[in-house]
Image: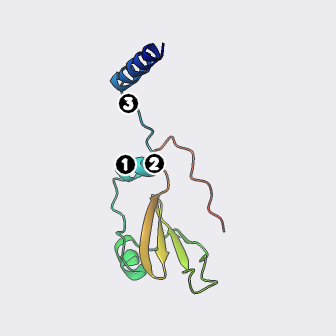
Amino acid sequence: MRQTACVALAASFIALAALPSRADTLLADRARQQIGTPHPNRGMTMAQVQQHFGAPQSKMDPRGGQKRDWPTINRWVYPQFTVYFEKSKVIDVVANKAGANEVGPRPPVR
């Protein structure tokens, strides 16, 4: 009986391994692939971003900086992406929408 259960279990694993695998695609990965417009690179300064991409649509209020260990984060919003700065250097760029039919992102906290 125990041997039958082991054989059945092994057969189940083999059957599952033969199935095509499917993984979810994260929005961040999809947005990174679909961003066709030039965007700021990590490490650029605020002055370099403004020189290459012009003035942002809006500059969000800074967040953080209450303690020495919490750097101030600034956010500049452009039509296709939002740029995140730590102090005065780019740390990340996020696509505002991955596609025209997508709803989002949620409005930023002001």
Q: CA distance from mark 2 to mark 1?
A: 7 Å
Give the camera-side residue of 45 and 5. 5
- Farthest residue, direction bottom: 68
Q: What label sits on residue 67 in the rendered view?
A: none
Q: For marks 2 and 3, give the one nearer the viewer.
A: 3
Residue at the disc numbered 1? 34
Identify which amino acid the numbered label 3 is placed on.
Ser
Residue at 34% in and 57% down: 37
Task: Kindly indicate whether the residue at mark 1 contacts the one at mark 2 (C-beta within 8 angstroms).
Answer: yes
SS of the residue under disc 3:
loop
Residue drawn at 37 percent across, 48 percent down: 34
Label 2 or label 3, whichever comes before in sequence order: 3
Q: Which mark is residue 21?
A: 3
Asked if the residue under mark 3 is in contact with the one under mark 2, i.e. CB atoms within 8 Å, the reply is: no
What kind of element bears circle 1?
Answer: helix
Rendered-image quadrant of the C terminus: bottom right
- Tell me the quarter of the picture where residue 106 sits: bottom right
Three-letter amino acid code of the residue under disc 1: Gln
- Residue 90 in percent (x, y) is at 42, 74
**Residue at the extreme right of the image, as rendered:** 110
Tell me residue 39's x, y (percent): 36, 64
- Relative to 4, 67 lies left or right: right
Residue at image point 36% right, 79% down: 48
- The residue carrying mark 2 is 98
Could you tell which of marks 2 and 1 lies nearer the N-terminus?
A: 1
